[in-house]
Amino acid sequence: QVQLVESGGGVVQPGGSLRLSCAASGFTFSSYGMHWVRQAPGKGLEWVSFIQYDGSNHYYADSMKGRFTISRDNSKNTVYLQMNSLRPEDTAVYYCAKDAGYCSGGSCYGYYQMAVWGRGTTVTVSS
Amino acid sequence: EIVLTQSPATLSLSPGERATLSCRASQSVSSSLAWYQQKPGQAPRLLIYDASNRATGIPARFSGSGSGTGFTLTISSLEPEDFAVYYCQQRRVWPLSFGGGTKVEIK
């Protein structure tokens, strides 16, 4: 079955960096876009970033542009999130998610929605 | 950026009752809207994509409707496992965005 496992979270000081990883299995990873979504303690969901199936396009939330970089290695079935210049407000559980997009009968559905989610990795930014 | 406003913030209902959750967009998102369910300590789960399509394995008591700026998630008869927080998400415009959530709690 589809499985996503995030890692790389931890405690970091303000201004520091972390790289999150998400290992995928159970599907053809190189055929699907991937998302990162975060959730601050006690708060709602916040979309972070998306990368196209082949890495050709990526998008970011405005508050993360210039600080976060998404990438993927299709040979390792892994998507990454490099986070620099971290702030206390970046403290959250970070989830990776498989895009729900598919095409059938000449039409495409579900793109840029999150079909399957990992369990998340916790990032704490604090001095 | 498109802002999604969910209402009510909290819905107090009993098992077996019908739940109606609303999501309003600050501008038209056509039918490009999803609904997710999240239980405490768990990752979210996709319920509905493209406004009205149930995701794989989602029971028929969950249905989505709407287009443009107004959307509804309906749970026809609440089961004990349906008490959770529900989020809408638009995919029409980058950056993608989520609503603030509606908590469905046991009355």
Image (tube, coloured by chain):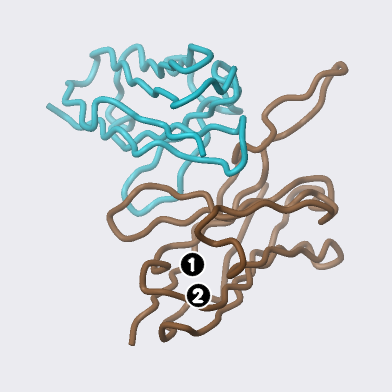
Q: Secondary structure at mark 1?
A: strand
Residue drawn at (83%, 61%) of the image = A74
Instruction: Choose top left, top right, bottom left or bottom right for residue B33.
Output: top right
Task: Say which chain tag 2 marks.
Answer: A
The residue carrying pointer 1 sits among few (fewer than 14), some (14 to 19) or many (20 or more) residues within 10 Å by Cα, namely: many
Q: Quadrant of residue A70?
A: bottom right
Which chain wears brown?
A
- For residue B100, which quarter of the picture? top left
Say whether residue A120 is left or right of residue B74. Answer: right
Reply above or below: A21 against A118. below
Q: Disc 1 designates what residue?
A: A121
Percent of width and height locating residue A38: 47, 56
**Image position of B5 (left or right of B9):** right
| Element under disc 2 | loop
Q: Position of residue B84 (x, y in %)?
A: 31, 36
Location of mark 2 (residue)? A9
Q: Which residue is pictured at 41% across the width and 55% down the height? A: A39
Identified by mark 1, the residue type is Thr
Q: Chain of mark 1?
A: A
Q: Position of residue A32 (x, y in %)?
A: 77, 45
